[in-house]
Image (cartoon, grey):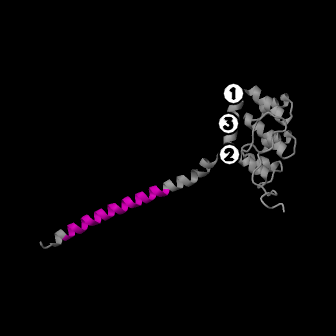
Amino acid sequence: MSSLTPEHLLLYISRNCILLFKERAAMRKLTRLLAVMMLLLFSSAPVMAGGGLDVFINNLNVQARADMDDFSARVSAQFGVPLSQVQAVIGTVQTPADAFLCFQLGKMAHRPYRDAVQAYHVNRGKGWGVIAKELGIKPGSPEFHALKRGDFSLTGKPGDSAPVKGKGKGKGKGHNK
């Protein structure tokens, strides 16, 4: 066994300190990287989980732009509004899906579609939830939840504009005793 001179001991300690320092620096970098990745993951979760209304709007706009005459005719039939009035509303809003949602929200709020179009123009850019509240649709109501889920369909059938029924406090599963 060789004896360690102070120089050898100092060299050994300095090498280990450098390695330890490099490991700690690497660990700090790894920790920072993981923190940034978690932040990105959690901040983008609402966007990834968005679906719902945005997906419905995008799909409806694709359908409408493929055949605007058919889209207008189906909206007219479904909401019982003359075709010329549907076309007029389409001409005043940003997208065809916006026109559909004006008719849909008017129907859900039991208000004339003109009120929904007016609320749309006043609150444009604030979101459909704000427009719905302006029309008297209460947050937490089945109608409001249907809006957030994008739970609508354009069938072109008269009176077929009610949102799909969801979970409610109905008299089922033993509650009707």
Q: Quadrant of the C terminus?
A: bottom right
Q: Position of residue 46 (x, y in %)?
A: 62, 51
- Residue type, numbered disc 1: Ala
Mark 2 vs 3: CB contact within 8 A: no
Residue 39: % across, % down: 53, 55
Instruction: Tell me the residue at 76%/49% (across/down).
Output: 130
Q: Nearer the viewer, residue 93 or 165?
A: 165
Residue 86's mark?
Answer: none
Q: Residue at x 57, y 53 (%)?
A: 43
- Which residue is the site of mark 2? 52
**Where residue 73 appears, x then y in whole percent?**
80, 29
| Total numbered labels placed on residues in the image | 3
- Which secondary structure class fits the magenta region best? helix
Task: Name the amino acid type tagged 2.
Answer: Gly
Residue that label 1 marks: 66
Q: Secondary structure at mark 3?
A: helix
Residue found at x 79% / y 31%: 74
**In the displayed structure image, the side of residue 94 where residue 110 appears, left or right:** right
Most extreme residue toward the left is: 2
Question: Real-space Cα distance between discs 2 and 3?
Answer: 11 Å
Q: Residues within 10 Å of mark 3 (few under 14, many from 20)?
A: few
Q: Which residue is mark 3?
A: 59
Span colored in magenta: 9-35
